Amino acid sequence: MGISCRQFTSLTAVALCFTINSANAQGTVKIGALLPMTGPQQANGVQISAGIRLYMEQHGNTAAGKNIQLIVKDDGGVADNSKRLAQDLIVNEKVDFMVGFGLTPAALAVAPLATEAKIPEVVMGAGTSIITERSPYVVRTSFTLAQSCVIMADWALKNGIKKVVSIVADYAPGIDSEKFFKESFLKGGGQIPEFIRTPLANPDFAPFLQRARDAKPDAVFVFVPAGLQTVLVRQFLERGLDKAGIRIIGPGDVTDDDVLNRMGDQMIGTVTAHIYSAAHPSKLNKEYVTAFEKANSMRPNFMSVGGYDGMHLIYEALKKTDGKTDGEALIAAMKGTAWESPRGPISIDPETRDIIQNVYMRKVEKVNGELYNVEFATFEAVKDPGKINE
Ligand code: DHB
């Protein structure tokens, strides 16, 4: 409508605003996306929004007879902004879904508002286990760090990597990565002489990499979010840790499809565990990558499929509720939904509302002149280890 309710002050205007919103409620489903479209982690926002838009282009902007309206708000990766913008989406825009969440602090900040407003919060990017436990209205189509880190630890132990230095960004998903890798790796007899946590803002990794090198490990285990992997890898290579025989391992965020091809051939042979590779060899993924690249002139990464699959989950839930937007009914409809994603088969755990998906072991290889994460082993239907046996 162009004018927000907040801009109306007189009583008549309030009444008019109410009328417009109830008209919306009948014919239009509003989806408010909160994403870091600017700031250091903007790549997550760009990838997730591109995934959302591709889904809408391919499947049309109607579901169960309702028009689907997308409103994207840029939180700049700052959780206080996410919270303020979520309040605006709820109160003024009267959205039916809040989606996006390229970073954990944003997803956590909005969860109490989702509970209060009884609006589904579809987490398409953030990866800390606890997020889904913060509100019964949270559903996740991204991943948890724990899913990949446990499998990475087992692979390392079976493949001659016994001593590892852990380097993680000092915020929730970094702490989760460290915790789940550590538990499995130590249990299997590995050693971790150093646990290093690096700042999120403008980190200089050089002193941390020097500390890692001095410990003479077989590998460094790494998790840093979007925007920082290239810096860390460049400093790792510049300081010659690869030449000293130290490998990089970790969840696949470090060899993210978004930036891998610019990291250089020294990355060839790097093994990571992750939930999506642009090189995933299914027919559906080949079509996804072709359509995504055509629309965006860039390669899709794991964040993009979180956006794409999140929209699928919303469309399917609306079909099940006959277009009704009652939050509780939508969440009930989402539980147990299973489908094929470009990443492989996925489903929403009816117990936890978290995603169940395959985790793949991948190795960086050159394919047709470009670097890709080529999958070589599959662990099927992995539940979030952060919730099992708690
Ligand atoms: C999160 C952010 C990332 O960039 C990533 O690769 C994984 C997780 C997060 O904040 O949850």
Image: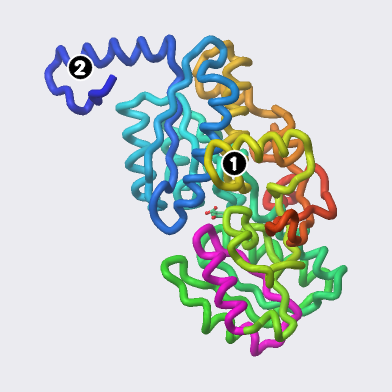
Task: State the residue position of label 1.
Answer: 293
Q: Position of residue 202 (x, y in %)?
A: 42, 70
**Circle 2 crowding by C-alpha within 10 Å: few under 14, some 14–19, many from 20:** some
How many discs mark residues in the rendered view?
A: 2
Q: Position of residue 22 (x, y in %)?
A: 35, 12
Tell me which residue sits at (46%, 55%) in the image: 41
Q: Indicate the colouring scheme.
A: rainbow
Query: Magenta stretch?
Result: 212-239
Left or right, 357 with reference to 294 = right
Image quarter for ligand 1: bottom right
Camera-near label (1 vs 2) is 1
Q: Tell me if I can see residue 152 in this picture.
A: yes
Task: State the residue position of label 2.
Answer: 14
User: On residue 175, which mark appears?
Assistant: none
Looking at the rendered structure, the secondary structure element under dot 1 is helix
Q: Position of residue 322 (x, y in %)?
A: 58, 11
Q: Tell me if I can see residue 276 in this picture.
A: no
Residue 213, quarter of the rendered image? bottom right
Residue 354, quarter of the rendered image? top right
